Image (spheres, rainbow, N blue to C red):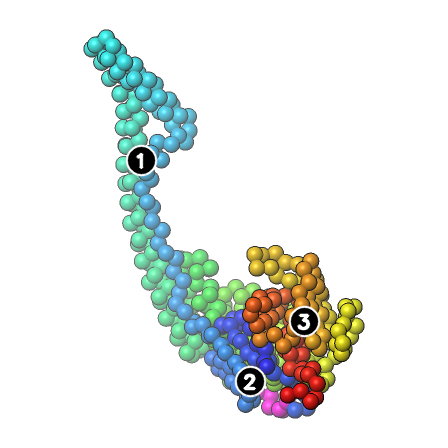
Amino acid sequence: MTFYVRKSLAHGPIRFGVSPRLPLDEIDDDPSLSTGPAGEFLRRRTHGFFLADSRAIGAPDIPKPSSIASTPFWMSMAPEDARGWALIGMMGFGALFALLGLAVIVNKGPQGIIPLLLGLTLIGVPIFITAQKRNAIRSQEERERAEREERDRINREGMASYATALERVREDPSESNLLAAAREREKLELPYKHWRPLAKRSVLHIGFGALAQLGPKGAREVGKLIERAGSSVGLDKADSRDVKVDLYRVAVWHLLADDRLGTVQAGEMETLRQGFGITDEHLEQELAAIQEFDRLRGITRDELPREECGVSLQFREHCIYTTPGRVLAKKGGHDEGRIILTNKRLIVEGRRRVELNLQRIDDVEVDADTHLLRVVAARPDPPIELQTQQPIYSAALIDIATTIDERPKGFA
C-alpha cells in the first residue's frame, strides 16, 4: 500500500503518495525541476500519485460596505451621562404623578386631572427629546451613508484598475507594466491587508515564470525580479522575501513528491537557496522533511530497522520502531505518550493504551503542516490521530510493516 502526505503550499494544497524511495544512484541526473512556469507539478517519473488543488490568483478583496442601522427607540433612551439619568428620573416621577392622578380621579373625581397631566408631561418630554435626537442621528446617518457609498465606489474602481494592472504584470513583467502597476497602487486608499494577498500571489506567479525560464542558476536574477515586482505592486520587504521562500518550498515539495531530490537536484536547490538569500530558519519544515525522506532510502519490508521497545512481545514478535508521540482526542486536548511499532502491532501508550493489529490498518496519512499522523483502521476501530516529530518516517514504517506476512509458509 502507499501512504499519502498532505502539504499546504502558497498556491494551493497538494497530496501525494509516498512509495518506497529510490536509492540515490537510481535518481536521474536531470537538473530540471519538477515545477512548471505556472507553479504546476511536472511529473518526470512514470509512477506515483499526485493531486493538487491550485487556487486561482483571485479577485481583489474589497471590504463589504458597512451599514449604519437605526438604533431601536428604546435603546436610544438608554442613559449615557448625567443628563440621560435625569431624563429617566423625570419619566419615573411622571409615571408616579400619572398613577396618583388616576387614583384621585377614580376615588375623588376631576381633582386628579392636574397631576395626571403633569405626569404625562414629565413622561412625554424625555420621549420628545429622544425623538429629536433620533432625527439628528438619522440625518447624520444619511450623510455618512452617502459618503460611504462614494468612498466604496472609488475603492471598487481603484481595485479594479489595480487588478487589471497586476494581470498585465503577470502576463509580461516588463518595466512599463511594473511602472503602470505602481501608479495604480499609489491611487489605492484601502489598507494594505485588502490588496496584499492579490499582490503577493501575482508576484509569486511572476517568480514561477522566471524560475522556469532561468532555472536555479539564475536565482539571483529571479530574486531581483521578485523584489522589483514586489516593490512596484506595493509589497513590503518581508512579503517579498516570503514570496522567494514560498517559491523555494514549492520546488522542494514537488521534487519530494516526484522522488527526484537526488545529488544533482539537491545541488540545484542549494544554488536556488543561496541566490534567494534564504536561511535555514525559513525552511525548518522542508529541511526536516528532506531528512525524513532521505532516512527512508533503502528501507523495505525485508530491511526494516529493529530496536528495543520495552514492552512484552508475543511469540515471533520483534520491535521495529519507537518514538514519542501525542495522541489527539476527538473532543480536543491531547495525551502525551509513546508510539511503538512491531512486526505485528501498532501500540500507542498513554493514559489509555491502544493496540492495533497491523492487518487491520487500511490507510495512513500525514499532514506535514501540523506533524499529524492519521492511521485509519478497519471498522469498528476508530482512526488514531498522532502528532510526532517525524510523521513521514513514522508513517512510512507503519505502511511498510503492514505488508509483512507472518503466516506459516505452508499457509495460503
Q: Residues within 10 Å of mark 3 (few under 14, many from 20)?
A: many
Q: Residue at x 50, y 78 (%)?
A: 51
Residue 200: % across, % down: 48, 68
Residue nearest the viewer, comparing 357 with 39: 357
Up the image or down, 26 lies above or below 61; here it is below
First along the sequence among labels 3 and 1: 1
Residue 327: % across, % down: 64, 62
Q: Is residue 317 left or right of residue 380?
A: right
Magenta part of the chain: 27-33
Residue nearest the viewer, comparing 301 with 165: 301
Residue 405 in view: yes
Residue 283 in view: no
Q: Is residue 36 left or right of residue 276?
A: left
Q: How many marks?
A: 3
Q: Residue at x 35, y 54 (%)?
A: 65
Residue 377: % across, % down: 58, 71
Whole-angstrom CA distance, mark 1 to mark 2, is: 67 Å
Type of residue at label 1?
Answer: Phe
Q: Quadrant of residue 332?
A: bottom right
Which residue is labeled 2 in the image? 48
Of the numbered discs in the image, which one, if any, rests on residue 73?
A: 1
Residue nearest the viewer, comparing 115 with 130: 115
Magenta stretch: includes residue 252? no
Residue ranking furthest to the front: 411
Residue 228: % across, % down: 51, 72
Mark 3 touches mark 1? (CB < 8 Å): no
Q: Residues within 10 Å of mark 2 (few under 14, many from 20)?
A: some
Type of residue at label 2?
Answer: Gly
Residue ranking furthest to the left: 110
First along the sequence among labels 3 and 2: 2
Of the numbered discs in the image, which one, if any, rests on residue 346?
A: 3
Locate the N terminus by quadrant: bottom right
